[in-house]
Image (spheres, rainbow, N blue to C red):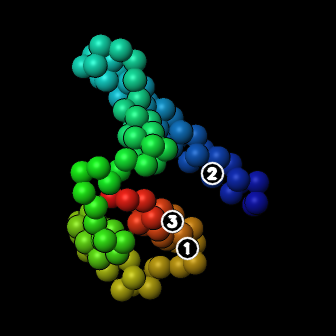
Amino acid sequence: REQKSWGGQLRILLYCATGGLMGLVLSMIVDRAFYGFWTLPFLGNLHFNVIEGRGSLYGTHPVHWYLTTGFPVVASGLIPVLLLKTSNGSATRTNLPLWAIVGCYIVLHSCSAH
């Protein structure tokens, strides 16, 4: 039984990796067509905002902005799904890693000037 579970998880991981790789390749092809050279714009953004620390060049928000404004706006389309999932008791401890990812995302973005 445990082996079957690992097989299912491995298959899901393979599907996700395949989809992610296809998205990355398509993005690179489109960027090549528009920029005229091979590039990964998100790496340029990471370098500019995090490594060089120039993310505050165009202004900043208070530290709580992602938690009080940014996250609710982005997640507003998912609130009905969240309410449905939590109201029928199907929310379990298996969802904790997903909440940890959301929490880390908010904390990391709140630490940088934005």
Q: Which residue is pictured at 63% across the width and 51% down the height?
A: 8
Indicate the position of residue 58 as horizontal and vertical percent values.
24, 51
Residues at marks 2 and 3, CA–CA distance in whole angstroms: 27 Å
Residue 98 appears in the rendering? no
Q: Can you tell which of label 2 and label 1 is closer to the viewer? A: 1
Question: Amino acid type of disc 3?
Answer: Cys
Q: Is tag 2's residue or tag 3's residue first in the polypeptide sequence? A: 2
Would you say the residues marked 2 and 1 are in contact, meaning their CB atoms lie under 8 Å apart? Answer: no
Residue found farthest to the top: 36
Density class for disc 3 (Cα within 10 Å; few <14, some 14-19, many ≥20) is few
> Percent from the top left, x then y, of residue 74?
27, 63
Name the residue nearer the viewer: 21 or 28: 28
Dot 1 or dot 3, earlier in sequence: 1
Q: Which residue is mark 1?
A: 96
Kindly indicate the quadrant of the structure image that contains residue 34. Answer: top left
Residue 114 located left or right of residue 40: left
* SS category of the residue bearing label 1: helix
User: Which residue matches tag 3?
Assistant: 104
Mark-to-mark CA distance, 2 and 1: 20 Å
Secondary structure of the residue carrying tag 3 is helix
Label 1 amino acid? Leu
Asked whether 2 or 70 is in front, the reply is: 70
Q: From the image, tell me which residue sits under label 2.
A: 8
Of residues 21 and 49, the one drawn nearer to the viewer in this rendering:
49
Q: Position of residue 48 (x, y in %)?
A: 40, 41
Residue 104 shown left or right of residue 31 in the figure: right
Q: Amino acid at mark 2?
A: Gly
Residue at the location (47% across, 79% down)? 91
Which callout, 2 or 3, points to the residue nearer the camera?
3
